[in-house]
């Protein structure tokens, strides 16, 4: 029976090492590994980079991976991205059984933040939890979980206990300890020093400097005059 899951064809690879991986990437392919086979064997493969990117963007949690003549239901286990370009440089899949529950993580998204009373009063919405640990059959894993925070008031907090898990999904995080969202009072900005005081201080400093300069000029003038008298005395 055909499924409506996204499918990607990959090729087994027998050569390994960093040099081989670089050669694959230059040719437009991404190296990867499939874990979790029934016999515990790992399958090394390479996939077309564009096709893989297309499948990952439009796919749900479950993907059909075609390796040779076999089709394996898999979920993404891990991805490695280039630190500068952000390109996918390696991917790990986990083969799953459709009749057995697995534990995984799903993204958590919040909506309605701008409509929350606490935000309208000037509060700041904080979302400390970005993904949830769940248990479910592979076919029941949601792409993500969305929570409505539009009812939160100032200094109110929403915990995981306020969420209802999707059908067939069990939350594994502590429902009372896991904070989903909270609205906090914004921190007060430090007071700026009064400008008038600074101006007065600067003025006094300038006046003091001018007075000192005038005094030095006066002393210098007197010394010069005194020196002239001495020279006249010597000459006389």
Image (cartoon, rainbow, N blue to C red):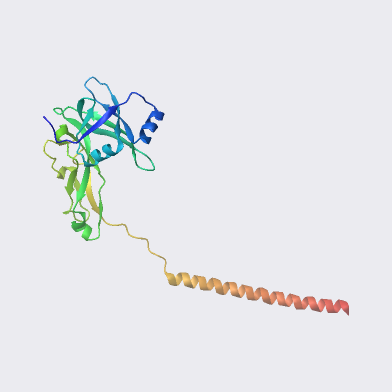
Residue 99 location (% of width, % of height): 13, 27
Say which quarter of the image contains residue 29. top left
Residue 208 location (% of width, % of height): 57, 73
Q: Is residue 45 above or below residue 230?
A: above
Residue 1 location (% of width, % of height): 11, 29
Q: Is residue 167 visible?
A: yes
Asked if residue 98 lies left or right of residue 234, the reply is left
Q: Residue at x 68, y 77 (%)?
A: 218
Q: Residue at x 16, y 29 (%)?
A: 101
Say which quarter of the image contains residue 212. bottom right
Q: Nearer the viewer, residue 116 or 81?
A: 81
Q: Is residue 32 above or below residue 128?
A: above
Q: Which residue lies most toward the front here?
A: 27
Say which quarter of the image contains residue 34. top left
Q: Which residue lies most toward the right here?
A: 236
Q: Residue at x 54, y 71 (%)?
A: 205
Q: Nearer the viewer, residue 26 or 227?
A: 26
Asked if residue 202 lies left or right of residue 65, the reply is right
Q: Is residue 110 above or below residue 29?
A: below
Residue 15 location (% of width, % of height): 36, 24
Q: Is residue 177 visible?
A: no
Q: Which residue lies most toward the top here?
A: 39
Asked if residue 18 lies left or right of residue 179, the reply is right
């Amino acid at each position: 029976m055909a499924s409506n899951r996204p499918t990607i064809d990959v090729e087994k690879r027998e050569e390994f090492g960093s040099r081989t991986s670089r050669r694959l990437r230059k040719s437009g392919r991404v190296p990867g590994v499939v874990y979790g086979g029934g016999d515990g064997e790992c399958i090394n493969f390479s996939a077309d980079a564009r096709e893989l990117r297309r499948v990952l963007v439009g796919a749900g949690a479950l993907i059909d991976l075609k390796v040779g003549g076999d089709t394996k239901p898999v979920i993404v286990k891990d991805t490695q991205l280039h630190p500068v370009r952000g390109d996918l440089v390696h991917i790990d899949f986990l083969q799953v059984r459709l009749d057995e529950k697995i534990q995984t993580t799903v993204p958590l998204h919040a909506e309605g933040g701008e409509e929350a009373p606490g935000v309208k009063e000037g509060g700041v919405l904080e979302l400390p939890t970005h993904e949830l640990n769940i248990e479910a059959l592979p076919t029941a894993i949601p792409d993500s979980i969305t929570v409505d925070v539009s009812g939160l008031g100032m200094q109110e907090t929403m915990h995981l206990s306020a969420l209802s898990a999707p059908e067939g999904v069990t939350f594994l995080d502590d429902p009372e300890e896991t904070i989903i969202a909270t609205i906090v009072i914004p921190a007060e900005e430090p007071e700026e020093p009064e400008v008038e005081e600074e101006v007065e201080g600067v003025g006094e400093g300038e006046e003091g400097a001018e007075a000192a300069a005038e005094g030095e000029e006066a002393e210098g003038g007197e010394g010069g005059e005194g020196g002239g008298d001495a020279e006249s005395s010597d000459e006389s």
